[in-house]
Image: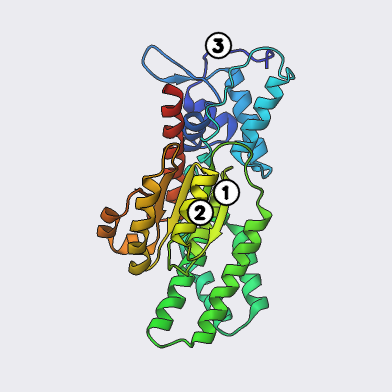
Amino acid sequence: MNEFSTAPLYNIKAVVQATGISPSTLRAWERRYNMCQPQRSDSGYRLYSDRDVAVIRWLKAQVDAGMSISQAVSWLQSIIDKGEAGGSSAVALPDPSGRAAEAMTLQPPTRHDMQNFATLQERLLKALLAFQEEASEQILAQAFALYPLEHVGEHLIMPALVEIGELWHRGELSITREHYATNYLIQRLAAILRTIPNGIGGPVVWVGCAPGELHEIGAMLLSIYLRRAGYVVRYLGQNLPVEDLVAEVKNVQPGMVIFSATTVESARALQPVCDQLAQIDPPRPIIGYGGRAFNLRPELRDSVPGVYLGATAVEAVESIDDLLVERQRQTLTT
């Protein structure tokens, strides 16, 4: 690292052109990971050094090769800590809970992408409802090859599940076909969840369904996204029992407990369990919740102690990161 000058020379436009990184991604990496330290010009503009540019290029190369940004930053910091970087460095890591830059910098799908997702959804539904497992697998494989996992989850799998449910409610789909299609997607996501390694260090996040809630796709997707963002995640599954869960939270002391609810009944069933969790002696976990019930009926949020995390699992990852960062800052200042 000593080979590179720390003199502030380049504005953000020049850095973007030199590294191929987008301005929004660069700002998110700075905010979440403090991975470079631009100085300010007399007119207030950010100015980056040759060392900053080298760090950004190195991190981008690791991410392009398939590594998460949190893993790449940790690797770079370990190199620096071992002295392989040669002396002091402009690179520094913030607290270990600032891990959601991947989700935050995920570029929204284009209009063409959304049209493609609509076509993929139509094909996937047709295959699933005809019990065509091989065709369903090929369609999902195509989607995963073209788009980030988060986009496939939010714009293909979740809409397909909603449509399956709507068809069943309208009496246009048999229970057997609904069960097959839903369970196929659950099993596919469970396989993905098993292949994604948990993070190392930092707060442990528990994710599960509200009492009485049997629809677990949303909670499973969130667990996948959180693991991809570098978190230590424990997925608890559907229909969590109140008393047993509260006892285990007291015993294990996770950093955060998150619930998903798709029905009004399960959303209302969250109130007593969240009340009990909120009364646990410190250190008590942060309580978060989300799901279709809270999106369709916003007034339900007022009765549940805790934090509504957003309309989608991707939004929830951002909220979770902010909550855990703030918790760690409060801990360090007390």
Q: Which residue is mark 1?
A: 233
Q: Position of residue 180 (x, y in %)?
A: 57, 80
Residue under the image location 65 percent in, 78 percent down = 133
Quadrant in which the N terminus is drawn: top right
In contact (CB < 8 Å): disc 1 and disc 2: yes
- Is 202 rendered above or below residue 170? above
Q: Is residue 50 left or right of residue 28?
A: right
- Is 197 rendered above or below residue 6? below
Helix, strand or loop under label 1: strand
Number of residues whose C-alpha sits closer than 10 Å to that of mark 1, classed few (under 14), some (14–19) or many (20 or more)? many
Residue 57 visible here: yes
Amino acid type of disc 2?
Val
Which sits earlier in the primary sequence, circle 1 or circle 3? 3
Which sits earlier in the primary sequence, circle 3 or circle 2? 3
Q: Nearer the viewer, mark 1 or mark 3?
A: 1
Q: Which residue is mark 2?
A: 207
Helix, strand or loop under label 2: strand
Q: Nearer the viewer, mark 3 or mark 2?
A: 2
- Is 11 rendered above or below residue 248? above
Count of residue discs:
3
Viewer-nearest residue: 238 or 249: 249
Q: Which residue is mark 3?
A: 7
To which quarter of the image does residue 242 belong? bottom left
Amino acid type of disc 3?
Ala
Q: Position of residue 286 (x, y in %)?
A: 42, 43
In contact (CB < 8 Å): disc 1 and disc 3: no
Q: Is residue 285 left or right of residue 298?
A: right
